[in-house]
Image (spheres, rainbow, N blue to C red):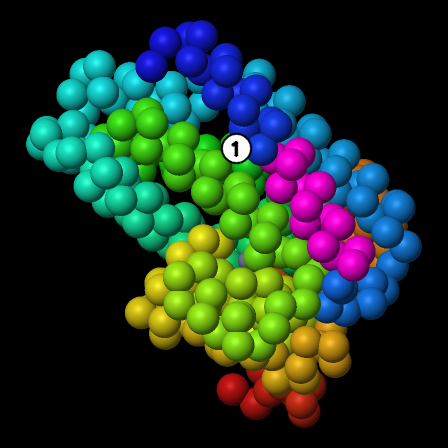
Amino acid sequence: MSSTHLASETAIRLGLFLGVFAVMALWEWRRPRRALTVPRLGRWASNLGLVTLNTLLLRVAFPAAAVGMALAAEAHAVGLLNQVGLPFWAEAAIAIVALDLAIYLQHVLFHAVPVLWRLHRVHHADLDFDVTTGARFHPIEILLSMFIKFAAILVLGPSPEAVVVFEVLLNTTAMFNHANVRLPERLDRVLRLVVVTPDMHRVHHSVEDDETNSNFGFNLPWWDRLFGTYRAQPCYGHEGMTIGIRGYRDPRQVDRLAGMLALPFRGRVTDYAINRRQWSRGESKVNDAR
Ligand SMILES: [Zn+2]
Ligand SMILES: [Zn+2]
C-alpha cells in the first residue's frame, strides 16, 4: 500500500462517512424511533463540532493512523498474522473478528475503570440518541482508543487492507446502530444475529445502570451474548426509556461543546458505572448500612 493509496483511502473514507451519514439522517427524518427531547440544531452543532475537532486532532497526532501501524508491522514482520501466509479473505476475517473483540473489551474497560468512565461519560451524556451520538467521544478517549488499537495491531499483525476494511465497517455500523430509526421487529431480530442494531445499542444509552452496563458491542453482537452482557430490550421500552446519565441533565454541561470537553473533570472520582447501582431506598442509606 503506497502513499497515493493512503491519500485516496482518506478521500474514500470521508466520502463514505458523509454518504452513510446522509442516508441515516434521512432515514431518521422519515421514520424516527423516538421523538427528540432537546432541539436538534444546537445538539448537532455540538456533536459534529466534537467530531471535527477529533478528526483534526487525530490527523495531527497520528497522520498515518492505524493503517500506518499495520504497514510498519508488516514491514518488520511483527504480529501473529504476519508469521503465517493465510489467503487474504481468511486473514481479513480473523483480523476483523479479533479487532472487534478488542474494541468490545476496551468499551467494557472504559465503563469499569473510574477515570476512564469519566472520559466515556461524554458519549453517554447525550440527552438524545441519533446518528451524531455515534461519533461523540471526548478527544482524550479518542487518543487512548488509538493507542489501544495500535497495541492490538502490533500483537495481531493484520494487513493494512484488513485494517481499512475493519475501520470502514466500524464507522458505518457505529452510525447505523446509533441511528434514531425504526426497524420492523422481525428484521431487527434477524439482523441482530450478525450486527448490532439501533434497538440493541440504544439499551446501552439508558440511564438505568444495569442497561448502561450491557450491550457493549459496536459492530458484532456476539461478544455481549458470549460474555453475559446482553440485554434484549430496555425495561421501560424504547419510547419510555430515558437516554443519558442520571444527574447529568444540564444542557450547558452535556449539550454544549465547552461543557462536553470539561465533563470528565467534573464530579466525584468514585462516580462510575460498573458495580454502582441506584437503589430505590437511596444510595447513601445502603452505603451507610454496609
Ligand atoms: Zn459505553
Ligand atoms: Zn453508543
Residue 87 percent across, percent down from the top left: 16, 34
Q: Identify the image quadrant of the N terminus.
A: top left
Residue 248 visible in this rendered orientation of the protein: no
Kindly identify which residue carries mark 1: 143
Residue 89 percent across, percent down from the top left: 23, 38
Residue situated in front as seen by the camera: 47 or 174: 174
Left or right: where 275 falls relative to 84 = right
- Tell me what residue is drawn at x 35 percent, y 63 percent: 223
Residues rendered magenta in the picture: 17-30
Q: Is residue 27 magenta?
A: yes
Residue situated in front as seen by the camera: 79 or 17: 17
Q: Give amino acid for label 1.
A: Leu
Q: Is residue 185 magenta?
A: no
Q: How many marks?
A: 1
Secondary structure, magenta segment, majority class: helix
The image quadrant of residue 183 is bottom right
- Tell me what residue is drawn at x 45 percent, y 36 percent: 167
- Tell me what residue is drawn at x 68 percent, y 49 percent: 24
- Tell me what residue is drawn at x 74 percent, y 80 percent: 240
For label 1, count other residues whose C-alpha is less than 10 Å away and answer few (under 14), some (14-19) or many (20+): some
Residue 287 visible in this rendered orientation of the protein: yes
Secondary structure under badge 1? helix
Left or right: where 147 falls relative to 85 = right
